[in-house]
Image (cartoon, rainbow, N blue to C red):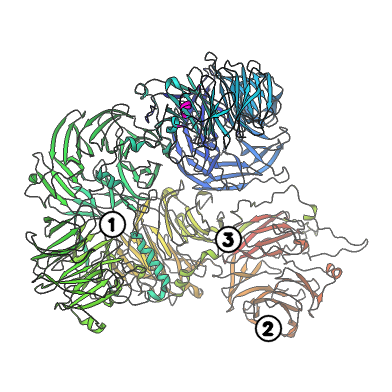
Amino acid sequence: MAGTKAAPQSQLRLQWVYGYRGHQTHNNLCYTGKKDIVYFVAGVGVVFNVREHTQSFFVGHDDDIISLALHPDQKHVATGQIGKAPYICVWDSSTVQTVSILNGGHTHGVAALDFSSKNGSRLVSVGLDRYSTISIWDWRKGKILATTRGHSDRVFDIQFHHYKEDFVVSCGVKHIKFWNFCGNSLSNKKGVLGKVGKIQDHFCLAFAPDDITYSGTAIGDIYIWHGNELKQTIKKAHTAAVFSIHQYTQGFVTGSKDSSVCLWTTDFDLITKIDLSILPEGYKGLSIRSVYQRDAVILLGTQDSEIYELSTGDETKARVLMRGHAQGELWALAVHPNSKKPLFATGSDDKSIRVWSMADNTLLSLIRVQDKVRSLAFNCDGVHLAAGMWNGSFTVFKTRDMSVVVEIKDRKEVLHEMKYSPDGHHLAVGSNDNYVDVYSVAEDYKKVGQCSGNSSFITHLDWSVDSNYLQTNSGAAEMLYFKMPSGKRITGQEEIDSITWATWTRVLGQETSGIWEKYTDTNDVNAVDVSFEHELMVTGDDFGLVKLFKFPSPKKGAKFKKYVGHSAHVTNVRFSSDRKFVLSIGGADQAIFQWRFSSEDAQLTARSTADYDGSAGPLLSCAAVDSDSQQSDSDSSDYEGLDSDLEAENQMDYRRAVYKEDAAVLKKNAWSNEGGAECKRTARCSLPSAGLSLKHVFGYRGYDCRNNLFYLQTSEIVYHVAGVAIVLNKTTGTQRFYTAHTDDILCLAVHPTKDYVATGQVGRLPPVHVWDAGTLKTLSILQGEHQRGVCALNFSRDGKRLVSVGLDDNHLINIWDWKKGEKLASTRGHKDKIFMVCWNSQDNLKLVTVGVRHIKFWTQAGGGFTSSRGVFGSVAKQDTMLCVVFGQQPGVCYTGTQGGSVYVWKETTLQKAVKAHEGPVFAICTVEMGFITCGKDGCIRLWDETFDKCIKVYTVEKHALRTDSCGVLTADRPAIRAAVLGHGCLLAGTKNGEVLEIHKDGGIQLLAQGHMAGELWGLATHPLKNMFATTSDDRTLRLWQLEPCRLLSIHALPKPSRAVSFSPDGCLVAVGYYDGSVSVLKAGDFSQIYSFHHRKENISDIRFSPGAGKYLAVGSHENHVDVYNMVTGRRVGTCKGSSSYITHVDWDVEGKLIHTNSGAKEELFFESPKCQRMQISRGVLEKMRWATFTCVLGDLVSGIWPPGTDVTDVNSACLSHGGGLLATGDDFGFVKVFEFPVTGKHAKFKKYQGHSAHVTKVRWSHDDRFLVSTGGNDTAVMVWQQQRASPVNGCHGDSDDSDTDSEEEGYDSDVAYEKSIDYTKKIYTENIREKDEAAVTIETDELEDEAHTYIKRVSRGQTEPEKVQKAAPPVTSSGRIQKVGEVEDLVLDHIFGYRGFDCRNNALYLNDGSHVVYHAAGAGVVLDLASGTQTFYLEHTDDIICLTANKHPKFKNVIATGQIGAKPAIRIWDAMSKTTLSILQGFHEKGVCAVSFSSTGKYLLSVGVGDGHDIVVWRWQDGSKVASALASEWRIFQAEFRPDSDTQFVTVGVKHVKFWTVVGGEIAAKRGVLAKVEEGGEMPAMQTMLSLAFSADGITYTGAMSGDIYVWKENVLLRLVRKAHAGPVFSMYTTLSDGLILTGGKERTFEGTVKLWDQEMKRCRPFALNSGTTEHVKVVKAVCRGKGKILMGTKAGELYEISEKTDSARLLVTGHAEGEIYGLRAHPSRPLFATGSDDGTVAIWDLSDKSLIRKMDIRGAARCVDYSPDGQLLAVGLKSGEFIIVSVSDELVWGRKRDRHSSVYDIRFSPDGQYLAVGSEEAAVDFYDLLQGSSLTRLAYCKGIASSAKRIDFSSDSKAIRVSTGAYKALVFEVPKGTPISDETCINKITWTSWSSTFGKEVAGISPGKTDSSCSYPSVNCVALSNHGNTLATGDDYGLVKLFKFPVMANNGFYKSYVGHCAHVTNVMFSYDDRYLISTGGDDSCVFVWKCLGVSIP
């Protein structure tokens, strides 16, 4: 059988799509500006030109489109799809090309879309996930601006408000919400129905001016909303659901399920109603899902997939533009056999059969049937059409009029396949009963045969040409053959092979093997049809693809052309009879696609064929996709395979066992496992005074990289090895280093200006660094998108963008705005490795990637990409491509292949192939007049600009090496991986790790070199000279010189080596091999002296004995150390005893003792040469002198082990010859220096990075001036120069983590408290204000009258007793009684309090000192100093804990405040207008503890209190996150931008200070480096830092817990200001005008709590507060300086203003200190009230002037207070169980008593003043007779209380009390006996003086969700009844103060709520005259005064 695996040359082109998606969607069709109609069906967006009857298609989706929006420009369209990772495409309706792709905002699907109405720059979308996530996009950038949960149920529509900017409305199942977009946050208000409407589903929206919104409802009403309140309903606008509303210039049009369309005026007055069901084109049950009006034409879309056009001028006629199948699957397809009648028929689960014309794309006939249709067949002349049904029956129709010929039911299951025989005599019907029935047409379809034998349902069948045979496929993958018409099965292969088939639709068989890919199920391909004349077959599969294959296709995995558009399984495909078309139908998408078939040669159509790759993301244009390599399993068979070098590179695994960042995690875990603070207090070895600096790096990474070597603008050369980027001055030979990477650098790119460099590395989340090659400073870090590593980088032509490619499975491609650190777009690259990426030199939106077996051409589209594959045609075969570059010609690029050719491309088409090298072409570079190529053949070739001629060839060979080169070539003709021309020379990098400069004459200068691929372990320094030797897995021994740094010689070794050693005189070199053998060589010529081979495993260490070097000790992985005599050349002993492999070997100075370490953590000693094991005591060991000390185990080096690491993590150690410094190398890539001996645990060190992975060896040079280190996998050799410490400033290096220091000086209780505060305990468990279903105003139809009027039932003639005693109504001057009105509203008037106990720098001057801004509870407070009035910002939902003001003149009075919360918000607001400017949310957890504006005011810094104490820099105006980082595991107290910078800021906190720089999208940090700052002094310890200030020239001041101020220059300690304050320096303030610095701290006296310093902090002026201030003023938490005055905030919650001139201070704000405030009582006759707090004070306040009258220290936490009836006495109940009675006038204690030992919850004077009732936690109420004097003898107590006595109310006659208990019961007792009163009749007759109970039928409605009137919902803490008895106030656990009308008897009573308190409101109380309501807070420690508004409040 002939067959091929090649793809066919023929192609399909989508011509027409029949259908429209009308079900489960709405508002999805519209007119464009060109009057074309836009809609969608399946996965295709359709643009329908009605005038010309043409369609164009957008096929960028890969699943069902379900939403659509038209841009205001009427050109751009947005469509959203379903899927696991659904995306949104914005496309041009004129060109049907993608403009932007929006990824990552949703899951499941995109339910609705809308463009912003103003300019269309934003797009809002809502998802199908369980939370209906809403996202707002900058769609051109593909960037999410804000996202939030929309609702817990389905959202049907979402739109931008057309007349309000930044407002969005969403509606859906039983809800409508009104959203405000601010910053990066969306906040919502639910629709308030009130009494106007009912809760129901809302389907659609429209808008009008004046904040009007219209919504269409499920019952046909239209709701009219003003803001979020329902104002009016249009009842029965329709009689069924309103699915669509469209606004046009003259009004509105609505469409409904009731078949009607209504036209409305702009005021929504009805103009006309049109019922489509009564029109000729309509039908009963027609449901309208979409309406759109333009001019006088209305466009309608229906549930049944029809599109109508209706003219408003002629309402009696509708024009049908499109019809299609409706809901259910579409399987049945049949093509009319007459080629002159291009007809086809379809049948669907919608119980319809339709006949269509392919010529004019119209529906010819439609018939409804009784069951689902699953198969169709025309007979041979097309007269009959048979239809197979779901129920097992079939019906035959006459095609002409669709009249029924016959109906037959012989089967019970679905008929999935049927075909007439070619002669027309028989009909074969295949069923799910596993049979094929054969019917005779001539005999009225009598059954004449049956085919049996299939074990599963029949899927496909075909007749032979002679009508004598039938072939079938079944669901069990069976292929059976039958003789017709009898149905007898035939099995003879010869007979079967002789059959010629009339049709071929079966999917199984050798002829169709090629359609099956690997791992596909036999049901994945649903349909096949073959065109025998064209030798082609078309398939439809479960993946929504239509494919073209050659036929026959006997080889599995044949290549194909594929076509997209269907959204789900393609159920059937057929060629038309004339072979001009292919028809395909979709199952779930119900779409019919008509494809134009073209058999022209692919070469002629290649340029016009849009071949897009569906695997890489969204697709475009014509729906055609060529399967070159990615979609076909035949690649390997047609492909020669990879070159050996490329195969090794492709298989390289860059994943690490441990990464550098793991060291910090291990340390943190170790601290917690080992006891935390106890471990840290352990004495640790001191930090070494000397350090290291990197001098030189030997190596260049060439073995797996390419194009990583460049000239810079300065003529320097940049390249990389290990984790270091190297800038080499080729003139001087000196190197400079960029060492910010933490792992292997894999790629490097140079900016077009040649002064910036981008480097990408290996890592879990590998970053890309962009840095300045001149200063070596990081400019940007791009991180968070890639995994495993970054393998390719390239700058755009203008240098503004950077593209990166990752090493993840999909080789993700990202485009970055690298300066901003923003990701602009991303996409999956390819399943195979990408070697290079290159920008199009003419278009910054286009780029090319090349890699293993592929090339792709990409175009950025918003946040995504579109891609097309290279079209090879017949020019050359597909190959792996390694490099790509663009030339001077527009759109032309050049790629180098592994076969040695250069391919020349024009756009996406291959133009020619040029043979350039023997072997892979690794690099191509453009030069002014041509190109440079280099390859594996060791040649560099110069080409002309057309690649027609090779101008010159340079060959890299040893003989060409110039004499001034600093090394020797490893081999001739090494593979060249990088080449570039510059400065008259060629620069080349080789696979062997060499950097070469080739001159015009061919001379080669070797600039740098290192080891080749393979691990590098062998290292030994020369004992007498500045030289060292290395051996590696690359089988070379290399001898290096340290001054100058260069390679001296190379000796090839026979096998890999991992150990090397010099003899004591340097004349011999011993080499240990991986196979267990050893060679001893002469150091001069490397001639061999001895060779030993006693071991089979790796030689891990080797060492000559000291002195004459008589012995050689060789340690192996066989657990032994062999000792050889170098005189005799024989083994003289073996050291045994180690239970694991030998890791290190050392000799003592006398050569008599061998010291070993093993992998089992063993430290052993052996006598030499006998090799007898010795036991050495610790005392002897400490006195011993060692010739070398490289062991890592033992007491002398116990401190080198990092916390949490195992015995293998430190690979190498080396003690300096001077004995003072120990260097180590570890698995984390760090070189560390310790002070020796390193005893104890976790010694201090200085660490240095550069190596990328495990550092295998470290060795000091003979004079200790240098340290040499080798890297394992990174192959790098690094030379470090020792730097001695100067007398004052120590050698800094990179010091040990400061948070491991244990010597912090002193302790302070205030600091300790702040360290330990846990904000999670203060956060709402369920924040009512943020909850989705919460509404401030209750949504209810109506309130029962009982909720307003308390109806009392008494006998006729009786006087009705008052339930609560009311105050006497006021009397006018004329003596008339004034009517008392209700309290209708509250306005916050004043807050007593300022949050100072856990905050700092949170009180600031505004407006040149005329106002002060600060915060208390959840309120931002602005105090007018002139009037003393306060205004408030009340938008926060929990405690505000930080505040800052924008100091830039452009942003005057702009304030930022941060709060606590599960998802805490930062709000930026205007201090004068209180308007919210921006809301920043979604990054921090638990809370935001610090905020700071940058110098220009454009950026905001925030710090979280979550576990990682994350820091974020925001562009606050648009709410975008610029950069973020995890800052510290410890608490951060303050963070501030430098006053002159937008990128630099400092953070201080627990034992750390860090200096940060914003670099692109990341933040780089430097720790504060401590240094000796005093001659002869000790190194200062790192303190807990609390505050910050700045000065010029990079100077930073930090205030410490000890009272010292640390002065830093950059990040290095410059000096100390000792004891600036006696205690912690909590606050510092930099005065920008004069540079003076203000500090506030903790002092023992009032003197000097605030100090003003000069710019250098050398002189200060202390300020003393006036007498009379409280003791708490000794702790200052905030300072600010204005013009001649100082603002000071204290821990006690007070704000003072100090005059600089007079030192006088005045109190601005006061309140209680930290502690809950429960005690509250209003004076009975004066505008005063008293409060008692846990801070141990009772305060009396004046309501008239909002001032504190007095504060009394009661030396205990107060829990309740009460005034006597005459106001002369004040009773205070304490938490200790004691109570006190104080005389108000003189503050003297009148009486004190303690009869209980638990908290006093309530205390009350009786109305007659005789008794005092004290209720306590001990379930008791005690009575005291005050007339008996201050002895306070208890008379009695209430008995029978089952729980604590929470609240007490006296009766008006003082004879009874009501006790509200903790068990939610109200008990009544007799006074003073305490006898219970249980008679309800008696209780009902009692009139109470007050109402404080939270439960009872009178207050049944105060708690949401309460159903039992006998008990209260526990969230309500307190209630207070107004003195006039008509208004009830409550306070609850959610921080809300609420007003109800009293009584509140109906459940969920109507209320108004007020915010400001952050957590539980503990008490509320009306003033004596009801003018004010006072509320107290628990955690917020604040007292709020609310002004009562109402009718005739006196």
Instruction: Report, in whole angstroms, how far the alpha carbon at label 2 lies from the one at label 3.
Output: 36 Å
Q: Can residue 1060 be found in the magenta stretch?
A: no
Q: Could you say which disc has been placed on residue 1795 in the image?
A: 2
Residue hosting label 1 = 1252
For marks 2 and 3, the one nearer the N-term is 3
At 58% from the left and 61% from the top, the residue drawn is: 1324
- The residue sitting at 73% across, 81% down in the picture is 1824
**Residue 615, relative to residue 17: is it above or below?**
below
Q: Quadrant of residue 1057?
A: bottom left
- Left or right: residue 1272 compared with residue 191: left
Give, as a single range, the part of the protein colored magenta. Answer: 493-509
Q: Is residue 830 left or right of residue 268?
A: left
Taking the image as drawn, is residue 620 in sight? Answer: no
Task: Find residue 1942 and report its horizontal and vertical position in percent.
Answer: 76, 59
Image depth: mark 2 or mark 3 in front: 3
Q: Quadrant of the N terminus?
A: top left
Residues at marks 2 and 1, CA–CA distance in whole angstroms: 72 Å
For the residue labelled by badge 2, is the local secondary structure a helix, a strand or a loop?
loop
On screen, residue 1902 above or below 73: below
First of labels 2, 1 by sequence position: 1
Q: Residues within 10 Å of mark 2 (few under 14, many from 20)?
A: few
Q: Nearer the viewer, mark 2 or mark 1?
A: 1
How many marks the image carries: the answer is: 3
